[in-house]
Amino acid sequence: MAGFVIAPMMPALILAGIVLAAGGNAQTLGYAAFAGYIAYPFALLVGLPAFLVMRRRGWDGWRAYAMAGIVLGVVFLGLFAGLAGFEGDAADPAWLNLLANLAFLLPFVLVCALGSAMAFWWIARPDLQRP
């Protein structure tokens, strides 16, 4: 349970660290809080089923969780880009700007997803709960 509470905070903490390191202020830290609003529903809707599948298949090592984190990061980015496109017309400049920045967002999203997966694995340690 603690893994599902703490791991989704990782994107917000990573973003807060980046913002503070770049000289951001309290106002720009609001982006970190927003990351939490996105991460918790994603963890519930996608991360929990992924955990259950991994547990059922016996994929409980840190490498399996690292790979799952990377895959889920790509899934998140795809869903995010797709949902942003449904907000309006596909030719909307904001949507096109988002798509143009996917190459910039990908490393950040992957670091956040990997951080969340590793935090979850480190807390839950499914490799130690084998029957």
Image (tube, rainbow, N blue to C red):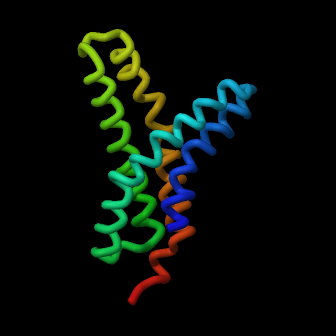
- Vertical placement of residue 3 versus 24, above or below: below
| Occupied quadrant, residue 103 | top left
Point out residue 114 in the picture as x, y percentages from the top left corner.
49, 52
Point out residue 32 in the picture as x, y percentages from the top left corner.
60, 36
Point out residue 35 in the picture as x, y percentages from the top left corner.
52, 38
Q: Is residue 123 left or right of residue 129?
A: right
Q: Is residue 72 left or right of residue 7?
A: left
Q: Residue at x 66, y 31 (%)?
A: 29
State which quarter of the image contains the C terminus. Answer: bottom left
- Vertical placement of residue 45 versus 35, above or below: below
Residue furthest to the bottom in view is 131
- Vertical placement of residue 30 versus 76, above or below: above
Point out residue 120 in the picture as x, y percentages from the top left corner.
51, 63
- Vertical placement of residue 65 versus 26, above or below: below
Q: Is residue 106 left or right of residue 86?
A: right
| Occupied quadrant, residue 98 | top left
Q: Is residue 58 left or right of residue 112?
A: left
Q: Residue at x 66, y 35 (%)?
A: 18
**Number of dots carrying numbers:** 0
Q: Residue at x 31, y 37 (%)?
A: 79
